[in-house]
Image (tube, rainbow, N blue to C red):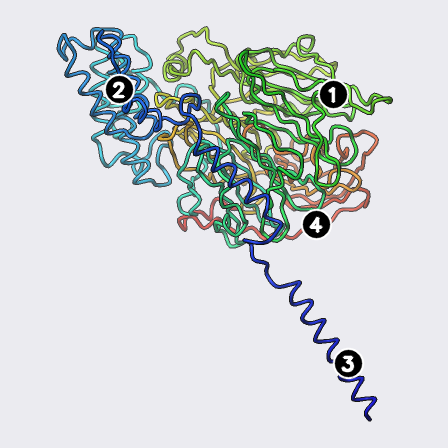
């Protein structure tokens, strides 16, 4: 009996110890002391220190500090022209800093104090700049008092609907008077004409009240889009209309619950990143704090990838773009811990550097089954920030091999970098869009057996893709479904950034312009490309920043959304939408799309947010100066007439998220046999689509086959047949089978009238 009692006591103690042990293991850790977030705390402290000590003399973003410094120092000029230039500069910085009313007050003082009298001030071409600034300041005042302070789902989307018309008319009314006065003296000022039309539109007086000699037909560029239903902006109703500056946008399932989440950043030095998690009921919650992202601020672009093959999507944030020496900021590599939190492992991973950048691209460059990343830093003649190629070591660390592999050169203001297999040899090549330099195309020639390094050859000139000389964002996609990756990059002429409205007016009025245009290059399959911009309807001056592609109507042909604009407030032009007409040409459907937003478009993401099989869009809006904030938009897709399939690929022995794998879908239906080609990835250079493949099938009723080249390698080909349409399908590499994933479409809640934006 005693022996039995002893055994029971020992057993009880062992059970108690085990319970206490597992309770301790499973009890939530204090995030303030959890070592997983040491990197977060270090990065937050580093960013805070850099931001507080940033020098406004070399950091373009810091208009507020520059204005304060100008006011504090004053000036000692005696010549009137010098005084005018100083005062104009001061007012310009005030406006950029968001101190609009004070800028207006000072500009009016300048005009009233003009030596020849206010009536003669406008006759002076040099002083006209003061009137231009005053007019756009009033236009911005109207935006601030209406589109920002009284924001709704229709705000700033052309053509303006009744509920988007300004309720407080003061700003736009003053702008109309000023632009009318300017045009009396300078009747050929196309920029003033453009902004005059915009001002009338904000008051609901376009086109009837616009003087006929100044009228610009905003519907001039649109082509017919029969059957296309305009998208709806539901960001306000969903509470994800972040009011901030230019930034990144990612649509991705970060918690693996089958619903797409949204990640976005803002260019502001102290603007925290945002992570919106879908609740599976049509709504979102801001989980940024719970995700341990507090203090992780700034960033103009971001790209996701499962770099450690653990099945959870990680994030790379890119910082410092456009700021030259003022942009020596670190990027952030955020590891997804799989429990709703992210760890900033930039320092421990070996990726800490201080270079201005806004573009990076993930791919398995050396075919070892691990995703590597190329970061294109911005250079000029005065400063060199070498580009970086971080090769994945497989233990959550990276080694920069750019110099050894010949990819660290000064590529100017490298504004877009995209890995793609341009010659279908199973090796990832690299396209770099360079502002103020010839573009680069580095072909991957494979591994040097002795050194184990990959050999790259720049063939851009031979390939015929060096232009535009002033290029910015880029898309690499198969626009004509021939199995070859094509290139689309737009121009960003620096000498015209203050005249974006003028260039827009020329295009709408059919006035010829010598300004450099966008280029669409068709891959000819022999490492050369043909410029088909004109024949495809894309020979345009787009001033794109945000740039991505997706299938707006599930017809199987990839369309393009371009976020437009430049740094100045005068850059008030609609974001543009181009519909792919089965590879024959692109139709502009900007005004008919419901997505012609006037605010500057940056991160552009396509993804199926409501699980109904079509792609919705999330867009980060706003400018690159402190006062140029705007509300982000979520455009829900109501176009449901075509069929689709969503493929979730899982690599085994290759990148687990399937990035850079090539997919060929053969389908059949009323139009006969159709073939569609896709590459798994996040899409264009500025913005990030969901990694799962959301593929439109047009009116096809049957999928004959799906061919997958894992990592794009022809030696790793698998073919699947009898796949269902209008379903989500998961395929694991090497399993020789597919699984249908049950996902119930749930309408985005929005304003209660959004059910037609979700196919049930």
Name the N-terminal-most of marks 4 and 3: 3
Q: Residue furthest right?
A: 450
Residue under the point 75% across and 14% down? 526
Q: Which residue is mark 3?
A: 10
Cα distance between the residues tagged 2 and 3 = 83 Å
Asked if residue 289 is positioned above or below residue 270 in the image, the reply reads: below
- From the viewer's perspective, is 304 left or right of 222? right
Labels 2, 4: front one: 2
Mark 3 and mark 1: Cα distance apart in space: 63 Å
> Is 565 on the left-hand or right-hand side of 675?
left
Q: Counting residues from the N terminus, which is met first, the one under dot 1 or under dot 4?
A: 1
- Element class at badge 4: strand
CA gap between label 2 and label 4 equals: 70 Å
Circle on res. 532: none
SS category of the residue bearing label 2: loop
Residue underneath mark 4: 740
Quadrant where the N terminus is found in the figure? bottom right
The answer to the question of whether label 1 and label 4 lie on touching residues, with beta carbons closer than 8 A, is no
Query: How many neighbours does mark 2 have within 10 angstroms: few (below 14), some (14-19), or many (20 or more)?
Result: few
Q: Is residue 58 visible?
A: yes
Mark 3 / mark 1, whichever is N-terminal? 3
- Secondary structure of the residue carrying tag 3 is helix
Residue designated by label 1: 404
| Residue 350 image position (x, y, % from top left) | 67, 34
Q: In this rendering, would 8 be left or right of 203?
A: right
N-terminal label among 2 and 3: 3
Q: Which residue is mark 2?
A: 74
Viewer-proximal residue among 65 and 182: 65
748 up-or-down from 631: above or below: below
């Amino acid at each position: 009996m005693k022996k039995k009692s002893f055994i029971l006591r020992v057993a009880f103690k062992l059970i108690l110890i085990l319970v206490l042990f597992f309770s301790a293991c499973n009890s939530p850790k204090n995030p303030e002391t959890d070592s997983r977030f040491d990197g977060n705390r270090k990065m937050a402290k580093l960013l805070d220190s850099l931001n507080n000590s940033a020098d406004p003399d070399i950091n373009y973003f810091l208009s507020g500090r520059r204005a304060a410094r100008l006011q504090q120092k004053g000036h000692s000029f005696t010549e009137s022209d010098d005084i005018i230039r100083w005062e104009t500069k001061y007012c310009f910085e005030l406006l950029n800093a968001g101190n609009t009313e004070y800028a207006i007050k000072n500009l009016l003082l300048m005009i009233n104090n003009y030596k020849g009298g206010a009536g003669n001030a406008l006759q002076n071409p040099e002083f006209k700049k003061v009137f231009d600034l005053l007019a756009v300041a009033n236009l911005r005042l109207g935006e601030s008092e209406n589109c920002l302070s009284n924001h709704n789902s229709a705000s700033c989307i052309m053509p303006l609907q009744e509920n988007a018309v300004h309720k407080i008319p003061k700003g736009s009314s003053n702008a109309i008077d000023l632009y009318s006065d300017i045009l009396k003296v300078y009747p050929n000022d196309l920029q003033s004409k453009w902004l005059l039309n915009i001002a009338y539109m904000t008051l609901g007086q376009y086109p009837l009240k616009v003087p006929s000699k100044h009228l610009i037909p905003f519907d001039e560029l649109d082509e017919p889009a029969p059957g296309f239903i305009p998208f709806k902006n539901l960001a306000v109703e969903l509470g994800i209309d972040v009011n901030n500056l230019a930034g990144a946008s990612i649509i991705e399932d970060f918690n693996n619950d089958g619903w797409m989440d949204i990640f976005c950043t803002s260019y502001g030095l102290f603007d925290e990143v945002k992570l919106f998690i879908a609740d599976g009921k049509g709504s979102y919650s801001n989980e940024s704090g719970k995700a341990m992202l507090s203090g992780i601020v700034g960033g103009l672009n971001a790209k996701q990838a499962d770099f450690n093959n653990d099945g959870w999507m990680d994030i790379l944030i890119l910082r410092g773009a456009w700021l030259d020496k003022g942009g020596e900021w670190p990027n952030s590599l955020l590891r997804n811990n799989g429990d709703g939190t992210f760890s900033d492992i930039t320092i421990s991973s070996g990726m800490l550097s201080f270079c201005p950048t806004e573009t990076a691209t993930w791919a398995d460059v050396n075919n070892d089954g691990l995703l590597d990343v190329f970061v294109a830093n911005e250079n000029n003649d005065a400063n060199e920030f070498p580009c970086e190629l971080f090769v994945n070591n497989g233990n959550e660390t990276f080694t920069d091999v750019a110099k050894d592999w010949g990819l660290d050169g000064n590529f100017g203001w490298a504004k877009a970098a995209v890995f793609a297999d341009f010659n279908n040899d199973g090796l990832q090549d690299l396209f770099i869009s360079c502002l103020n330099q010839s573009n680069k195309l580095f072909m991957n020639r494979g591994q040097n057996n002795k050194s184990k390094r990959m050999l790259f050859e720049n063939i851009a000139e031979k390939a015929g893709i060096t232009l535009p000389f002033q290029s910015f964002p880029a898309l690499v996609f198969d626009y004509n479904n021939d199995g070859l990756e094509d290139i689309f990059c737009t121009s960003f002429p620096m000498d015209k950034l203050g005249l974006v409205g003028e260039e827009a007016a020329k295009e709408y009025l059919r006035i010829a312009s010598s300004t450099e245009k966008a280029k669409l290059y068709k891959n000819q399959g022999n490492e050369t490309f043909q410029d088909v911009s004109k024949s495809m309807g894309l020979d345009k001056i787009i001033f794109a920043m945000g740039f991505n592609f997706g299938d707006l109507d599930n017809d199987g042909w990839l369309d393009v959304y371009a976020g437009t604009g430049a740094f100045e407030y005068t850059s008030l032009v609609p974001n543009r939408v181009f519909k792919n007409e089965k590879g024959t040409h692109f139709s502009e459907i900007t005004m008919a799309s419901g997505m012609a937003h006037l605010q500057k478009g940056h991160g552009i993401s396509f993804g199926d947010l409501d699980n109904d099989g079509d792609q919705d869009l999330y867009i980060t809006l706003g400018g690159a100066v402190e006062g140029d904030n705007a509300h982000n938009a979520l455009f829900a897709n109501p176009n449901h007439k075509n069929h689709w399939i969503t493929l979730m690929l899982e690599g085994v022995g290759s990148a687990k998220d399937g990035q850079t794998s090539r997919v060929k879908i053969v389908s059949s239906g009323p139009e006969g046999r159709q073939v569609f080609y896709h590459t798994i990835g996040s899409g264009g250079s500025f913005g990030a689509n969901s990694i799962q493949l959301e593929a439109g099938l047009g009116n096809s009723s049957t999928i004959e086959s799906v061919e997958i080249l894992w990592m794009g390698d022809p030696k790793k080909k698998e073919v699947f047949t009898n796949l269902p349409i209008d379903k989500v399908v998961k395929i694991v590499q090497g399993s020789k089978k597919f699984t249908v994933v049950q996902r119930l479409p749930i309408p985005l809640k929005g304003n209660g009238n959004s059910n037609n934006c979700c196919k049930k």
